[in-house]
Image: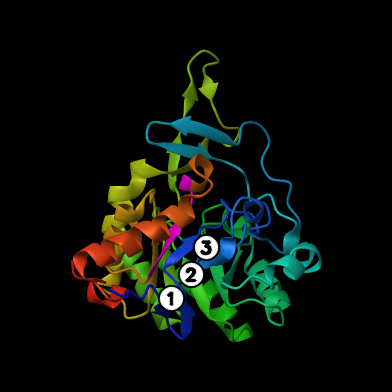
């Protein structure tokens, strides 16, 4: 039986639904030395900010039960650095190219997105989990009306497809997704990492300099899956689902919950070839189950 892994996310066609999540795949260059990354559906770039960032001090990654915590601090070359040094490689890739961008102020978001307007980018993924510098550090993606302003203003300055990456720490993630739709977003991606903590009992202090860090990996999957399902039931724009996906079965669960595409993050650190294995596993499942296209099972839950 012939299976078709193509999925349509708004007006954009992915050759398959497997996308590498921001912050876990760089800009694809290193992984391209391990396998042909053009077999993937897409890549979401390392999170960019308007200006270059060195990231957080101290420990940045900490293993925990069924997952990992990170406090990298958005270390990145800045939007212009990305354009100058990474776009030449990035733009030649035969897959959907997503650029993830964050900011500490509304102005940062606007200026960063404007710089990307004439570049070889297919989708902008707006990371609203960033701390709002002018509001005392609370993330833009916690309160609906704060997020609304960012999405509205960014939507005004770009015609590129705009996907909003939602934080599971939002006060109302379904309400947040509805705000994204109302303000003209072309889709949403969820979930980002959960706010978490680890303590070094011998040093009697937090493991991370910033005290709290982001939890990802298999530990968050059941909660992420529930959130994706809730959002998919309440918005008509497409959804990229993520959170603890480590194999094809996990990916299929998210698609059955309603996701159009899925993103793989932490699993890349465990198995650099995991993207290919998930694609092959989805195709194998479809053949065994007599499924011709993923539309047949999307959102059946």
Q: Give the residue pinned by disc 2.
A: 164
- Cα–Cα gap, marks 3 and 1: 14 Å
Residue drawn where x is 46% and y is 86% of the image: 11
- Which label number is shown at residue 187? 1
Estimate the x, y position of residue 189 in percent, counting from the top left. Answer: 43, 66
Badge 3 local density, few (<14 within 10 Å), some, or many (20+)? many
Residue drawn where x is 63% and y is 84% of the image: 157
Q: Secondary structure at mark 1?
A: strand
3 and 1 marks in contact (CB < 8 Å): no
Closest to the observer, 261 or 64? 261
**294 in relation to 61, above or below:** below
1 and 2 marks in contact (CB < 8 Å): yes
Badge 2 local density, few (<14 within 10 Å), some, or many (20+)? many
Residue 172: tell me if it is visible. no
Q: Which residues are magenta?
A: 261-267
Q: Give the residue pinned by disc 3.
A: 128
- Residue 214 relative to residue 50: left or right: left
């Amino acid at each position: 039986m012939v299976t078709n892994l193509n999925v349509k996310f708004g007006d954009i066609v992915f050759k398959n639904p497997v996308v590498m999540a921001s912050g876990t795949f760089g800009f694809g260059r290193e992984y391209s030395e391990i396998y042909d990354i053009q077999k993937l559906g897409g890549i979401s770039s390392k999170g960019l900010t308007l200006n270059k960032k060195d990231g957080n001090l101290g420990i940045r990654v900490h293993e925990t039960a069924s997952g990992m915590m990170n406090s990298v601090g958005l270390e990145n070359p800045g939007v212009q650095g990305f354009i100058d040094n990474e776009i030449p490689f990035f733009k030649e890739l035969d897959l959907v190219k997503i650029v993830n961008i964050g900011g500490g102020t509304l102005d940062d978001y606007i200026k960063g997105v404007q710089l990307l307007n004439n570049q070889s980018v297919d989708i902008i993924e707006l990371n609203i989990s960033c701390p709002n510098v002018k509001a005392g550090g609370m993330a833009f993606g916690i309160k609906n009306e704060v997020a609304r302003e960012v999405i509205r203003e960014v939507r005004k300055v770009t015609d590129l497809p705009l996907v909003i990456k939602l934080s599971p720490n939002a006060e109302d993630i379904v309400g947040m997704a509805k705000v994204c739709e109302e303000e003209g977003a072309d889709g949403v991606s969820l979930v980002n990492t959960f706010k978490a903590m680890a303590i070094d009992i011998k040093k009697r202090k937090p493991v991370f300099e910033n005290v709290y860090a982001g939890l990802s990996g298999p530990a968050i999957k059941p909660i992420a899956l529930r959130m994706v399902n809730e959002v998919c039931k309440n918005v008509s724009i497409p959804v990229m689902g993520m959170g603890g996906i480590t194999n094809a079965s996990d990916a299929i669960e998210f698609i059955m919950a309603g996701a159009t595409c899925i993103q793989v993050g932490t699993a890349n650190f465990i198995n650099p070839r995991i993207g290919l294995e998930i694609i092959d596993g989805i195709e194998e499942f479809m053949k065994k189950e007599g499924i011709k296209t993923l539309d047949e099972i999307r959102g059946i839950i």
